[in-house]
């Protein structure tokens, strides 16, 4: 009976165990899969989502009924309560790779207070714009981990945080706590606290308050980070109370005075990791007799970067047997590093080492990580033959030598068989990539970018996860073998000289997250196999010579794609069906300078996270679709240089988000848009660049555009806008203002004089009137381009323009300006010396029209190099001020069609960079200065229709200007290229003709004399040669006699020579005398 009872108990126990196991498996076997979070917590999280700005879609997974499946959320496996909320992208995460993403808002919504069971809260890396730390955090009493670092918080610490008795880790780094009076709460009211980070909080000695020298024991704190604050003076006494402290960061604490450094090590013997970056330490602090080496006995990690330790490597480190990690970066060391067999991580970046041999790359056999960037080695990195026997095996796993090496990549790196990471970028390396790198079987990350490497891409093994060879001079094709590197996640071969097609084997890289092949010479079609790269986030094929059609198949499995760029492939066509629904949600799309078939892409209507869209030069025609109006506002939108037409009312005008765009812009220029500027543009208060140029827009400039307070570039040129220029256009932030080629009337609004940052002011080709205001030169001191071309301005050129020291283009042509040219224009500094262009945003390739070399030219990419002054077609009088010849940077000078008189300045040849000079249509007199021939770059000259006289100068550059129209209308000019010859005053034309004929006869006679002279030489030579040589040739006796005569003469000379030597007492041996 007892056995049966026992058996029954066993069966009950087994059933219970199986049931519990099944329950556990159901609850926990798939993470949070089978547990549904509470509705209250789900709604709280959704409310929080609505309260923040999410430019990268980090919370895009927060949909559906089960919040336990949402990204960043972790629930209890049994109850389903939310236990963890992490809103920071973890380093190296897939979404965070392409660019930094973060959430933001004005404050943390209190809805998070509903997460009563929360144990882990991480808001680090968000941006809450200077708001206070929310008080409701104190109600989350189960919190054990709280990270509010680098989240934009400031102010006092809420006292309710002291109620979180279970809190073990608190990170308030970069929270501005200046003036907080309750710092003691962090140390004495959180009994469970083990890790506290207060780095870069703006703290000083006063903020630590009364507990600076408290004797109260703090036994639990093991990790304390106070780095980057403003502490000074003696060390706080409470350090000695932290009996369990193993980690301490006091970076930026001035330890240079007294015995602070030695005292610190004595006070906290339990330390194993110590960071003292930027503490003013030098080599005396590391060699002081007061420094007891025993105090270093427990230190395993020592950070002394950004101090003043110079010269010889401190010997104290060789005696620290426990030391594993040593950071001496950004000091001034230059001597050889001794062998430290226990050291595994050494950072010597930013020192003064000249030879890579000194950092011990070939001698430190046990070292696993070596950082020696920014040392500017003068000798190539080669292996020392003496070290082959010293290190039979190298433990090195990380080698970081960026911005320091030179020469070639040594083949000897292949001996470092354990290497996982190699960073040699920005190091002026030349030559080929050695094959030995491809044989490093453990290599995971290789960065050789920004060098001058040549040759082909070698074969690499399968463990490589990151390969960056961008910005080199590599040639050849992309090897098919790259498709065998199955672990590859990031591949960047951009900005090289690679040729041939993209290999189809790329489609086998199933782990690939980013692929960049832009700016090469690749051709052929894009392989459809790229559509199988399911983990791909970023794809860049831009600036190549790719061709063919991109279809839906190229995106079949790219569900994670966020960044796509095929721009600048003019033969590539993007052709998908109008009802295609892509599997991805893009953040950035660039199809510029490609061909887009079937009009405006219909599939974009499903893309709700776009922040950048560039469809410029994509051959799109027709009107903007109506559905586009309901799209979320796209911060950076470029539809320029297409054939789009109709009104602008269908621009994206939906919800506003993505406020973290660096350069919000709207480029719609060079299309056929008509009607008026839509009022919806007034909502774009984030805009920095707005370009609506070269359309057929009509009406006025909207009053509500004054809401665009951030606008720095406004380009409305080449439309049909009318009425006066409104005063509100003078937005304080404006740098470029281009309103040219419209129908504006009236005077310039005085408010424009308040634009102190204005760099380009172009109101040419309008119907503006009045005088040029004095404030243009007095207030707009940053002007580089001033263009009033073809208006109705009257009055004089104001002398205040001479104060515009950055001016490089001055164009007031085709107005009704009177008076003389101000001589002070010769003092425009930017036109005088080569101090560089003052243009801002020239990278936008904004166009400026200029009459140069007699034609209208549009300057875009070369605008920085254009220095031009055009005062033509006015009613200016007087002479050319000689001061203008000091403008040595001028490329063009046009003073034509005025009433200028006097002489052309003699030293006009000093304007050495002139390419175009037009002085036509004036009343200049006198001769053309000979110095004009010194203008070696002059390719267009017009001096027609003046009263110039005398001979046209010749020589040098003027010899190439043979068009007679250059000088027509000057009846007293003569000489080539004009048909009329020059005459000497008082000389009859007949005399001139006779003289010319006589000169021609004399020249012919001179040629005859030359021929006779050469004939005489030839005859004399023939007579003399054959008269002697010919006789000797036929008379044998004469030849014999001549030979004997020559021999006797030689003997006589020898005898006379030795007689002379004897007379001077020189001893001559007998055999020499007998010979003579």
Image: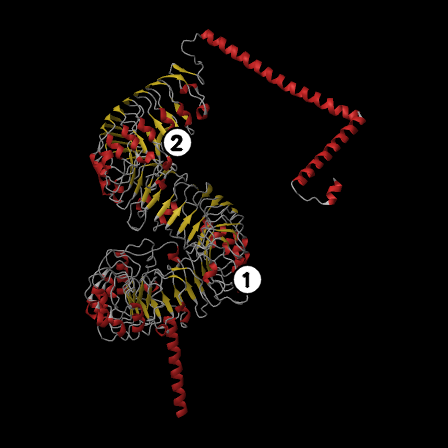
Left or right placement of residue 398 versus residue 1016 in this view = left
The residue tagged with tag 1: helix, strand or loop? helix
The residue tagged with tag 2: helix, strand or loop? loop
Circles 1 and 2 in contact, beta carbons < 8 Å: no
Asked whether residue 741 is in view, the answer is: no
Where does label 1 land, which residue? 385
Residue 913's disc number? 2
Left or right placement of residue 482 versus residue 3 in this view = right
Residue drawn at 70 percent across, 22 percent down: 1024
Instruction: Tell me which corner region of the image, top left, top right, bottom left or bottom right, holds residue 352.
Output: bottom left
Q: Nearer the viewer, residue 253 or 1011?
A: 1011
* Residue 177 image position (x, y, % from top left): 23, 62
* Residue 867 image position (x, y, % from top left): 35, 33
Q: Mark 1 or mark 2, which has the lower sequence index?
A: 1
> Crowding at label 2, few (<14), some or many (≥20) Cα neighbours within 10 Å?
some
* Residue 699 image position (x, y, % from top left): 26, 33
Whole-number angstrom distance, CA of label 1 to CA of label 2: 58 Å
């Amino acid at each position: 009976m007892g056995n049966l009872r026992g058996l029954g108990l066993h069966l009950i126990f087994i059933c219970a165990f199986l049931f519990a196991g099944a329950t556990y498996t159901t609850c926990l076997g798939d993470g949070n899969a089978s547990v549904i979070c509470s509705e209250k917590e789900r709604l709280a999280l959704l409310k929080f989502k609505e309260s923040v700005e999410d430019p990268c879609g980090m919370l895009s997974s927060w949909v559906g009924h089960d919040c336990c499946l949402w990204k960043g959320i972790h629930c209890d496996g049994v109850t389903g309560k939310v236990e963890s909320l992490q809103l920071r992208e973890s380093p190296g995460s897939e979404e965070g790779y392409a660019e930094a993403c973060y959430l933001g808002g004005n404050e943390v919504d209190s809805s998070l207070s509903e997460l009563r069971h929360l144990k882990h809260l991480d808001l680090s890396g968000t941006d809450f714009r200077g708001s206070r730390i929310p008080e409701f955090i104190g109600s989350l009493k189960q919190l054990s981990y709280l990270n509010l670092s680098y989240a934009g918080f400031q102010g006092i610490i809420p006292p309710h945080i002291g109620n979180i008795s279970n809190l073990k880790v608190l990170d308030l780094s970069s929270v501005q706590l200046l003036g907080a009076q309750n710092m003691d709460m962090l140390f004495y009211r959180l009994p469970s606290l083990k890790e506290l980070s207060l780095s870069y909080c703006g703290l000083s000695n006063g903020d630590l308050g009364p507990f600076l020298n408290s004797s109260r024991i703090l036994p639990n704190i093991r990790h304390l980070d106070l780095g980057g604050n403003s502490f000074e003076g003696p060390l706080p006494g409470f350090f000695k109370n932290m009996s369990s402290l193993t980690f301490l960061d006091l970076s930026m604490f001035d330890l240079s005075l007294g015995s602070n450094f030695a005292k610190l090590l004595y006070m906290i013997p339990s330390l194993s990791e110590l960071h003292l970056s930027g503490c003013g330490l030098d080599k005396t602090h590391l060699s002081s007799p007061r420094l007891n080496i025993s105090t270093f006995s427990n230190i395993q990690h020592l950070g002394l970067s950004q101090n003043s330790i110079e010269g010889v490597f401190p010997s104290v480190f060789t005696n620290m047997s426990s030391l594993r990690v040593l950071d001496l970066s950004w000091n001034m060391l230059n001597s050889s590093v001794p062998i430290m067999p226990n050291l595994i991580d050494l950072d010597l970046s930013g020192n003064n080492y000249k030879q890579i041999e000194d950092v011990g790359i070939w001698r430190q056999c046990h070292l696993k990580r070596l950082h020696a960037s920014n040392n500017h080695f003068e000798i190539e990195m080669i292996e020392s033959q003496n070290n082959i026997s010293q290190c039979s095996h190298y433990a090195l796993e990380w080698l970081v030598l960026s911005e320091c090496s030179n020469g070639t990549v040594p083949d000897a790196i292949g001996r470092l068989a354990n290497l996982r990471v190699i960073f040699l970028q920005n190091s002026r390396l030349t030559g080929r990539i050695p094959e030995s790198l491809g044989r490093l079987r453990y290599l995971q990350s290789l960065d050789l970018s920004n060098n001058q490497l040549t040759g082909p891409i070698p074969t690499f093994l399968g463990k490589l996860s990151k390969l960056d060879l961008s910005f080199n001079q590599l040639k050849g094709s992309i090897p098919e073998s790259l498709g065998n590197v199955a672990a590859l996640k990031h591949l960047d071969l951009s900005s090289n000289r690679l040729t041939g097609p993209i290999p189809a084997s790329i489609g086998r890289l199933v782990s690939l997250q980013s692929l960049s092949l832009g700016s090469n010479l690749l051709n052929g079609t894009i392989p459809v196999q790229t559509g199988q790269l399911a983990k791909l986030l970023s794809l860049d094929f831009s600036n190549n010579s790719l061709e063919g059609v991109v279809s839906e198949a190229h995106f079949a499995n790219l569900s994670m794609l966020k960044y796509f760029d095929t721009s600048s492939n003019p033969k590539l066509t993007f052709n998908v069906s109008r009802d295609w629904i892509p599997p991805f949600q893009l953040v950035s799309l660039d199809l510029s300078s490609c061909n887009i078939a079937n009009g405006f892409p219909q599939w974009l209507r499903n893309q709700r996270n776009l922040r950048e869209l560039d469809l410029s030069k994509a051959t799109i025609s027709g009107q903007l679709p109506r559905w586009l109006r309901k799209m979320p506002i796209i911060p950076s939108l470029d539809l320029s240089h297409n054939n789009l037409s109709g009104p602008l009312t269908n621009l994206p005008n939906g919800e506003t988000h993505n406020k973290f765009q660096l350069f919000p812009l709207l480029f719609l220029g060079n299309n056929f848009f008509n009607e008026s500027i839509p009022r919806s543009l007034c909502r774009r208060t984030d805009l920095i660049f707005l370009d609506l140029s070269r359309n057929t827009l009509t009406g006025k400039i909207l009053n509500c555009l004054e809401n665009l307070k951030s606008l720095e570039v406004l380009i409305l040129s080449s439309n049909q806008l009318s009425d006066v220029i409104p005063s509100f256009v003078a937005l304080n932030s404006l740098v470029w203002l281009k309103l040219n080629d419209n129908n504006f009337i009236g005077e310039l609004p005085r408010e424009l004089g308040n634009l102190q940052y204005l760099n380009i002011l172009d109101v040419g080709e309008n119907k503006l009137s009045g005088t040029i205001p004095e404030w243009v030169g007095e207030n707009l001191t940053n002007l580089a381009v001033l263009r009033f071309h073809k208006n109705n301005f009257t009055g004089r050129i104001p002398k205040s323009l001479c104060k515009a020291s950055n001016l490089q283009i001055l164009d007031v042509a085709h107005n009704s300006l009177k008076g003389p040219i101000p001589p002070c224009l010769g003092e425009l500094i930017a036109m005088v010396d080569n101090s560089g262009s003052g243009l801002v945003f020239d990278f936008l390739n904004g166009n400026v029209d200029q009459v140069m070399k007699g034609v209208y030219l549009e300057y875009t990419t070369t605008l920085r190099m254009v220095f031009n002054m055009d005062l033509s077609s006015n009613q200016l009088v007087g002479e050319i001020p000689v001061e203008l010849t000091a403008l040595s940077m001028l490329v063009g000078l046009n003073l034509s069609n005025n009433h200028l008189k006097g002489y052309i300045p003699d030293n006009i040849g000093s304007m050495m960079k002139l390419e175009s000079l037009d002085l036509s249509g004036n009343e200049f007199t006198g001769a053309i200065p000979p110095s004009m021939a010194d203008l070696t770059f002059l390719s267009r000259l017009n001096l027609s229709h003046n009263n110039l006289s005398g001979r046209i100068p010749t020589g040098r550059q003027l010899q190439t200007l043979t068009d007679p129209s250059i000088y027509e209308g000057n009846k007293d000019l003569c000489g080539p290229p004009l048909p009329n010859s020059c005459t000497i005053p008082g000389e009859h034309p007949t005399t001139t003709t006779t003289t010319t004929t006589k000169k021609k006869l004399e020249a012919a006679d001179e040629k005859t004399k030359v021929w006779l002279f050469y004939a005489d030489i030839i005859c004399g030579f023939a007579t003399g040669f054959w008269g002697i040589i010919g006789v000797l040739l036929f008379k044998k006796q004469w030849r014999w006699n001549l030979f004997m005569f020559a021999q006797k003469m030689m003997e006589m000379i020898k005898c006379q020579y030795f007689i002379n030597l004897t007379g001077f007492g020189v001893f001559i041996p007998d055999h020499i005398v007998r010979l003579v």
